[in-house]
Structures are given as C-alpha cells and as structure tokens.
Image (cartoon, grey):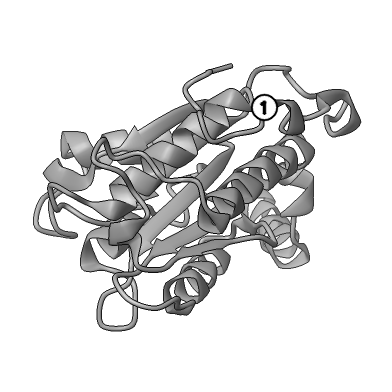
C-alpha cells in the first residue's frame, strides 16, 4: 500500500475484504486495472486525475497500468500491428477492470479518448479485450459540473460489453482542483474519486472469475451449436 495520499483518512479506507468477494476459482492476485485518459496537453487534467486514481487504486491493493495515448496513431492510419496499438490491446486483455477519464470538449468526449476505444476490437478471434471487465468512468470539466462525458462513457462501456459500476465522478473547474505538483486538493470531488476507486476494486474482485459465466449468452451458444452441426455435416 502506498502512503503518498496525504488527504486520505487511511483508517477509514481499509483494503477490500477479498474473501467476501472472491470466487473459489479466484487466482488470488491483485486486481488488474487499466487506466485510459483523453488529453495530450502538457497540463492535462484528465491525466492528473488518472494518476490520482492510480495512487488510490494501489493503496487498495490493485496492480495498475496507465496507457499514454501520445504515440497512438489515428484509427486506420496504420495497420493494427503498430506497436502502440498492440500495447493497448495487450493491456486491455491483461486488465480485469478499467478506469476511463476524459475531458469534456464540445459537450462530449475527446477524439483522443475515442481513438483509444476505437482501436479495441469487440472480438479478435476468440479473444475479447473488453468483455466482462469492470469499468469506472470519470470526467473533468473546465467550467461548471456536467455529466455529458460520463454518460457517453457509459454508453461506450455497454457497447464494449463491460460491467460499469454504479458510481462515477465529474470534476468541475478542474483547473482549481489540482495543486502546482499535479496533486488533487482535498475536496468533495476528491472524496468522490476515492469512492469510485474503492467501488471499482470491490466490483472487480466480485466479477472476475465469474465474468465468463455472466456474459455467456443464449444467442452465442445457439450460433456455436449451429456451427458445430454444420461442421459435423
């Protein structure tokens, strides 16, 4: 657990009670969380929020990776064999849960963020890089509080067949919520981010080991049966 969380009352944020959440088939390793953010600006507030979320997740015992979108080409401008595309897909497959953080631009998510999701296929052979993984959504805004981005991210999460947790975070006037070192200041916004990360870890422990069963669908079983029958014929 990290101690680099000066604004937390650590005694009020214990690690999740894993035995109450895990299945018997659970491998027992730390929850694997991939974090995506949606801005290339040097002073990107979505990146600052992503890194703050990572610190909290590590305190809660998770293993984390933050994907840097700077070198990711625009969709279809290069083959999918591009190293950064492959890195993004491999990290998504590695993950058991994800955090999506985007600024709000013109009332919706940024192209930088959407480009990352567009590079993730729903299905690649028998591998599905996002299906069954838990998802936490957050946004940063330059002005008053808005929920346009988190609502859009939830739609994307459903489309990618993910399990979006109930809680979410929208940080208004993000430019005044971080200090000169890029750390989030204590505030109700910060507390909400902690809430979201705590909930994500708990839901990830609860869903992993069960996700294959939870997303096993009648229509897909029917299609598989028809394909087997055709092959036998």
Q: Is residue 95 left or right of residue 9?
A: left
* Residue at position x 54%, y 25% in the image: 58
Q: How many labels does the image show?
A: 1
Q: Quadrant of residue 51?
A: top left
Residue displayed at 51% across by 59% down: 137
Instruction: Determine if residue 156 is in view.
Output: yes
Q: Is residue 23 left or right of residue 199?
A: right
Where 60 sits versus 202, above or below? above
Q: Mark 1 points at which residue?
A: 10
* Quadrant in which the N terminus is drawn: top right
Residue 92 showing in the rendered view: no
Report x, y in % for residue 215.
Answer: 72, 54
Where does residue 12 sit, x and y in percent of width and height?
75, 33
Q: Does 77 sit above or below residue 128? A: below
| Residue sitting nearer the eye, 216 or 104 | 104
Which residue sits at x=28%, y=59%? 175
Residue 120 in percent (x, y) is at: 37, 52
Seen in the image, is 33 located left or right of residue 173?
Answer: right
Tell me the SS state at disc 1: helix
**Image quadrant where residue 220 sits:** bottom right
């Amino acid at each position: 657990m990290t101690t680099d969380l000066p604004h937390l009352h650590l005694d009020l944020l214990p690690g999740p009670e894993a035995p109450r959440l895990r299945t018997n088939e659970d491998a027992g390793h730390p929850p694997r969380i991939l974090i995506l953010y949606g801005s290339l600006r040097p002073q990107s507030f979505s990146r600052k929020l992503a890194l703050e979320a990572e610190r909290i997740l590590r305190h809660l015992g998770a293993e984390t990776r933050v994907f840097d979108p700077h070198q990711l080409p625009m969709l279809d401008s290069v083959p999918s064999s591009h190293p950064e595309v492959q890195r993004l897909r491999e990290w998504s497959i590695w993950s058991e849960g994800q955090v999506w953080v985007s600024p709000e631009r013109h009332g919706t998510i940024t192209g930088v963020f959407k480009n990352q999701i567009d590079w993730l296929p729903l299905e690649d052979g028998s591998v599905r890089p996002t299906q069954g993984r838990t998802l936490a959504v957050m946004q940063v805004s330059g002005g008053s509080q808005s929920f346009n981005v988190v609502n859009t991210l939830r739609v994307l999460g459903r489309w990618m067949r993910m399990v979006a947790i109930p809680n979410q975070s929208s940080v208004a006037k993000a430019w005044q919520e971080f200090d000169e070192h890029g750390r989030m200041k204590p505030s109700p916004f910060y507390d909400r981010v902690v809430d979201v990360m705590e909930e994500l870890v708990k839901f990830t422990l609860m869903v992993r080991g069960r996700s294959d069963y939870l997303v096993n669908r009648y229509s897909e079983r029917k299609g598989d049966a028809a394909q087997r029958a055709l092959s036998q014929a």
